[in-house]
Amino acid sequence: MEKDSHFKFLNLIKNSIFSYFAPILHINVKIYINMKSKQGNSIKDISAKSKQINLFEAFAGVGSQHMALKNISHSMNWNINVVGIVEWFIDAIIAYEAIHNPVAFLPPPRKRKLEIRPETFKVNVNLSADSKKPLSIQSQKKYFENSETAFWLNRSKELSNNLFDITEVKAQDLPKNIDIFTYSFPCQDLSGQGLGKGMEKNANTRSGLLWEIDRIISGAKKTFSQSEMPKYLLLENVKSMINKNHYLEYKKWLDRLDKLGYESKQYVLNSKDFGMAQARERVFVLSVLKTHKDKVDFKFRDPKKTLGMVPIKGILEKGIPFDKKFNQYRLTEPSFRNDNVRKYKLENYTNFSSENMVFDINYNGSTLTASGALSRLKLFYGKDKIRTMTPKEAFRYMGFTDESFDKVVQTNLIKPNKQLYLAGNSIVVPILEEIFRTLVF
Ligand SMILES: C[S@@+](CC[C@H](N)C(=O)[O-])C[C@H]1O[C@@H](n2cnc3c(N)ncnc32)[C@H](O)[C@@H]1O
């Protein structure tokens, strides 16, 4: 055992030194990658007893799925192996790579332009600058010419096997023997704040991208043997996906999963019950290959008993100044929601109801959204003590470590408003941990 850690330690040092000097010496990124994978194999050989879990993340975002699995991998004796991701949003790709495939000792921003000489990103794929629509060829060029962005895009292709735009993924691109396939597809057409266009097949809505998963998995089923099919599938989306407006489509999806050979179970879970400061209710659908279903009982430990309640103040940074501009507005009497959120409203601040809301830090806080008023949560410490949640706090609010957030910031490519967007778009990590803990392979 001691020998193992010694070996890992030496590898870590070797890898860190190399990744620092590789850009300076203009060594091709690929060489570094090859070296990494060799190192990966040797670590795999050492921990021969741990079970390799092949993860595929469609709509990967910043990789909350990957993060949750890594967090529990030690206690589950799993070795997490990402066999592919699908993500087209440039900021999410950079953040994903920075978090999960970080460059040790990134040079200070001033020096980076000179030191990082990546290959140009040459792949002809659709990328998006806003997560919603593809960039034009002209605009893509602009991104590729920014060498730092190209550096991360290359890493994503090489290290995470990113297939980029889901509509361009072919069934034959899907690796065999995936253990966990996650798909938290866009919610904009389902959520209360959106236009409610729904997730119908062929309706050309963003939430309708769900049916791309059907296309890919049905296609794989034609060539894969039963034992090569993804073992578990995990869907995550907003709770309104199962309300009466969208229920018909949702039922169609469940029927489709059944036809594809999966048994499914739906959970509605609130992160405040999982030791989190945030009250965020989401639907999860866990599906297991019917041939494997006797191995799972779909039950998990009662999180309320194990994880307890954490108020907003439990995740706040110290020394952040209050915002005086809020002091000129009177506050309404507080109202108390049954999800343990206590909020006030700033009178006459704006015409938008949720923009006026201010959340008491002694209780749970509202759901963080990717955009709109609730992506800038206002925190109430006491009279004349109000400020907005920082991006670092937003990452904590979603269950990410400060280390992950710092890596995103260190890229120097993602502005604070985009950091908030990425956090609000993601999934609360400890909920995923609890779901993944139930899986048996
Ligand atoms: C709800 S978010 C998922 C976030 C993710 N679970 C995480 O951990 O951060 C949906 C993601 O789908 C991505 N997406 C939307 N359209 C896509 C497309 N055509 N191809 C690939 N990804 C897409 C968005 O950029 C966004 O990151």
Image (spheres, helix red, strand yellow):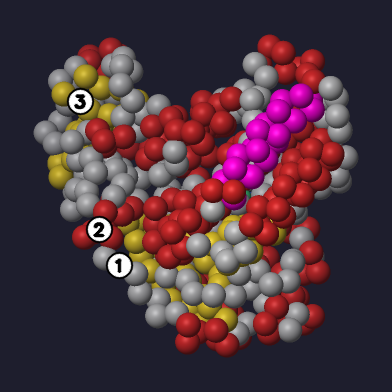
Instruction: State the SS at label 1.
Output: loop
Query: 10 Å neighbourhood of mark 3: few (<14), some, or many (≥20)?
Result: some
Residue 430 shows up from this direction: yes
Q: Position of residue 92 (x, y in %)?
A: 61, 41
Q: Position of residue 424 (x, y in %)?
A: 46, 42
112 vs 287, left or right, is right
Magenta segment includes 133: no
Please name the amino acid that badge 1 sits on. Arg
Q: Residue at x 31, y 54 (%)?
A: 274
Q: Residue at x 45, y 79 (%)?
A: 296
Q: Residue at x 45, y 33 (%)?
A: 402
Q: Earlier in the sequence, mark 1 or mark 3?
A: 1
142 vs 403, left or right, is right
Q: Which residue is mark 2?
A: 306
Viewer-nearest of labels 2 and 3?
2
- Magenta stretch, main secondary structure, is helix
Q: Which mark is residue 349?
A: none
Q: Earlier in the sequence, mark 1 or mark 2?
A: 1
Q: Which residue is mark 1?
A: 301
User: From what the image shows, is residue 223 above or below residue 194?
Assistant: below
Camera-nearest residue between 238 and 244: 238
